[in-house]
Image (tube, rainbow, N blue to C red):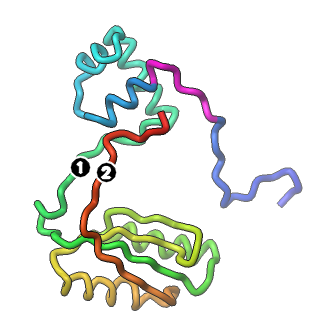
Amino acid sequence: MKKDETPKNLRQVAPVEELDRIDQALVAALQQNARLSNKELAARVELAESSCHERVKRLVQRGVLRGFHADVDPRAIGAALQALVAVRLARHTSAAVATFRRAMLDLPEAMAVFHVAGANDFLVHVAVPDSDALRDLILRAFAARPEVVHVETSLIYEHARTAAFGGV
């Protein structure tokens, strides 16, 4: 690698572009209810519908809005038990991290995967039907992996999400 080249494993981050008052209002409204029609959204932020549509499109293109998702209650689809699984890897190579991350993202029980700093390397939010299914998942998908040296599971009693990210 030449001196002025960026390593391929480092993400290229675009400069942060400030959100104006209208973009902040759009983001906040969509965080509250991503199913708002363009007409309803435009009315909330006091903007013409065509301008509102263009601003939302630009927020998506800039990566501010990364998607529009349904908030599914895991219990309603048979996954009554949630847990955070803390995982420590034996080695911290790019390959080991990428392999483990991909395996966790491919698990149907995984709701979220966090690569973290600290005593553990990953936190994996999982949802399963019951404690037997959780034990089986831990043994099959975590403890059996050769790169994993430690697994610690914490049951989630309650999961509450803020209505909107407070950063805007």
Q: Which residue is mark 1?
A: 71
Q: Residue furthest front?
A: 157
Asked whether, in this view, residue 40 is left or right of residue 151, the answer is left
Q: Earlier in the sequence, mark 2 or mark 1?
A: 1
> At which x and y percent is residue 98?
54, 70
Q: Amino acid at mark 1?
A: Asp
On residue 5, the disc is none
Q: Is residue 109 left or right of residue 17?
A: left
Region rendered in magenta: 16-23
Horizontal placement of 17 versus 122: left or right?
right
Number of other residues with Cα within 10 Å of mark 2, as a class: few under 14, some 14 to 19, many 20 or more? few
| Position of 41 relative to 83 (above/below) | above
Callout 2: helix, strand or loop? loop
Q: Main secondary structure of the magenta part?
A: loop
The residue that label 2 is drawn on is 161
Residue sitting at x 41%, y 41%: 165
Labels in figure, total: 2
Q: Residue type at mark 2?
A: Arg
Task: Give how far apart the Cα atoms at labels 2 and 1 are.
Answer: 10 Å
Can you give x and y, in whole percent of width and height, for residue 22 in the image?
44, 18
Residue placed most toward the observer, 157 or 28: 157
Quadrant in the picture for the N terminus: bottom right
